[in-house]
Image: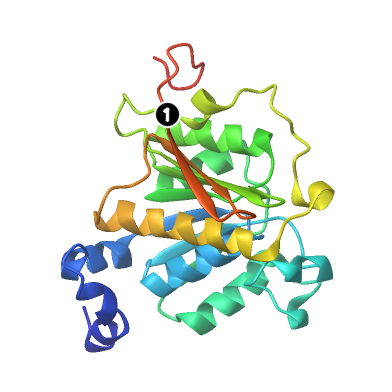
Amino acid sequence: MQDQQLLRYSRQIMLPEVDIAGQQALLDARVLIIGMGGLGSPAALYCAAAGVGTLAISDFDEVDLSNLQRQIVHRQSTIGQPKVESAKTALNELNPECQIVTLPEKLEGDALQEQIRLADVVLDCSDRFSTRFAINAACIAEKTPLVSGAAIQFGGQLAVFDPRQPENPCYRCLYDDSDDEAMRCAENGVISPLVGVIGTMQALEAVKLISGAGKTATGRLLIFDALNTQWRSMNLSKDPACPVCHF
């Protein structure tokens, strides 16, 4: 680790739970973030700031004025640009040492599988159940840890699914394909800082998974009520009838 890196990450390195080894693990890691919207924006910014060596960011949309209320990685000046390019500019300005791989597409099928195979951790910052189910299935197949976040109106959720341990539940154990596909910000609204809370928590869980610091939220569903500033934690169990992770 170079002197400039020791200085940049000094406040993390001084934490005994991280230390030099944990910081080096972050520098060597590759994180895939799917969705450069409200959740992906703070998640990407904090992953880059914390020293994740490579960030692969995926989104097929362009920056719109209505995004700027909550998607803090984008700027007025980048309206009309692909979100991944807009995000890359901001992330490079924050930490030029972080390698940004832009994926201006909807990851599906073999392309999704390959990107998850390359990643150490996947952050699902998408807003559709169909996308989340596909990400979960690919993470199970590749045994890649998945950090899932969701935010709508004044409510947020966070969970970590780690298929490296066969007894852990997966996203499909929690939700099935009858769940409502239409619960999206565009139709239901969302308060601006809520996505920052959940997206930042996703980044925190990714940093912990990579560095080995602390205990992650694996096997739990964290539910945040922003109107009343309350967190609830629910234990999750593996569904013995799950069609994805039950072998």
How many numbered marks, from 0 up? 1
Left or right, 111 with reference to 22 = right
Q: Secondary structure at mark 1?
A: loop
Q: How is the image coloured?
A: rainbow
Residue 232: give x, y in percent of width and height: 48, 42
Horizontal side of residue 62 vs 8, given as left or right: right
Residue drawn where x is 68% and y is 48% of the image: 106
Res 133 → quadrant:
top right
Residue 242 in percent (x, y) is at 49, 17
- Give the vertical position of 6 relative to 192 (above or below): below
Image quadrant in which you'd find residue 128:
top right
**Residue closer to the observer: 208 or 222:** 222
Task: Answer whether residue 119 is visible to the viewer in this image.
Answer: no
The residue that disc 1 covers is 236
Please indicate whether residue 97 sits to the left or right of residue 164 in the image. right
The C terminus sits in image quarter:
top left
Q: Is residue 164 visible?
A: yes
- Residue, x 66% and y 56% (percent of image)? 59
